[in-house]
Image (spheres, rainbow, N blue to C red):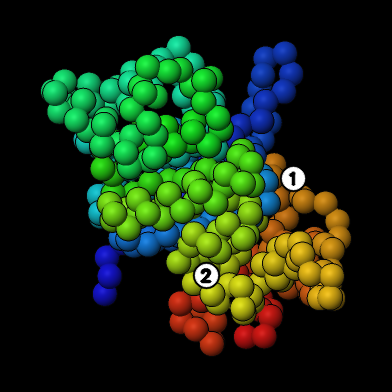
Amino acid sequence: MRRPILDIQHLKKYFPVTSGVFMRRTGNVHAVDDISFSVFKGESLGIVGESGCGKSTLGRCIMGLYPLTQGRILLDGKPLSAMTRKMRKTFSTRAQMIFQDPFESLNPRQTVRQILEEKFRIHGVSQQETAMQIELLLDQVGLDPGSLTKYPHEFSGGQRQRIGIARAISMTPQIVICDEPVSALDVSVQAKILNLLLDLQSALGLTYLFISHDLSVVRHMSDRIIVMYLGRIMEIANSQDIYNHPTHPYTKALLEAVPVADPDRPSKRTPLQGEIPSAEHPPRGCRFSSRCPVARSLCFEKAPTLSVCSHDPGHLTACHYPLSD
């Protein structure tokens, strides 16, 4: 049995809602609400869903940028919450993040050399070794050595993201969290960055947690896919099965919403009705019940749990009445 490199157990992240002159806490936004899954070494696990579903919050929780409300995160079986400051420093060499906006994530006052040198300096790497590693990094991400003396504003969006990728892989991490890494880029540049990520994964043996709202990008990058809605997991399956055999009505609606550039192919799109419920006051039963075209009374009363589908033991869906199962 494979052992997961990353294990998420009943993770919750709530953000407080305050009001009044004294900013008293009046409620919580349920950004991530009791989700569990595992990531295995060498795979690409995609996380997809509409904006506001909690996928980016999840990535930031794993990296320790947000404190957990509840739950555990284990890396190689060791809980991150139990780590000392020294252990956290070591953890930063094993897990890294590529952010959505390459301009926002890079210090505009530092040159590329300074940006890339920072991690080596923090971890006590010699100047000679640092210089050698930076030269290798630039070659790996396809940047010219002359880039080292330039500032982020002197580069295009795609080049800035290459700098961000170089920084993320500088300590040869085991797992890289890619948070919408191409959504801020032109379509013509996206394919080059995605292919670069795939090449680096093959060369360095990286494990990806790939977060995106673009289903076509997730399909290209992922071995398995998690579909999220309003802080909960709706479905988990391998990439091919998700696209060919969706069992959750929300997954089916997402796939039908993907534009098809074929005038001869009839549209099967059935637009979802209603608005996305408030994350502060989520539905009592299934999170998707208020917009689901096949919802029944049970869906409004009881939240479904992730259950194994009959056609594939690796396909899990959180639906009382799964489609074609």
> Dots 2 and 1: beta carbons under 8 Å?
no
- Camera-side residue of 268 and 298: 268
Q: Residue at x 82, y 62 (%)?
A: 272
- Can residue 128 be seen here? The reply is yes
- 10 Å crowding of disc 1: few (<14), some (14-19), many (20+): few
Q: Is the residue 106 above or below the residue 35 in the image?
A: above
| Placement of 40 over or under 101, stated as above or below | below
The disc placed on residue 10 is none
Q: Which residue is mark 1?
A: 278
Instruction: For marks 2 and 1, give the one nearer the viewer.
Output: 2
Q: Can residue 231 be seen by looking at this rendering? A: no
Residue 166 x %, y %: 36, 36
Residue 239: mark in rendering: 2
Residue, x 49% and y 84% (percent of image)? 312
Foreground residue among 48 and 138: 138
Q: Amino acid at mark 2?
A: Ser
How far across and down, in percent of the image, does residue 142 sit?
39, 40
Up the image or down, 124 lies above or below 214; here it is above
Q: Quadrant of the N terminus?
A: bottom left
Looking at the picture, how far across and down is residue 195, in whole percent? Answer: 46, 53
Q: Secondary structure at mark 2?
A: helix
In the image, residue 89 above or below residue 174: above
Q: Position of residue 57 (x, y in %)?
A: 54, 41
| 174 or 54: nearer the viewer | 174
Residue at (19% x, 30% y) in the render: 132
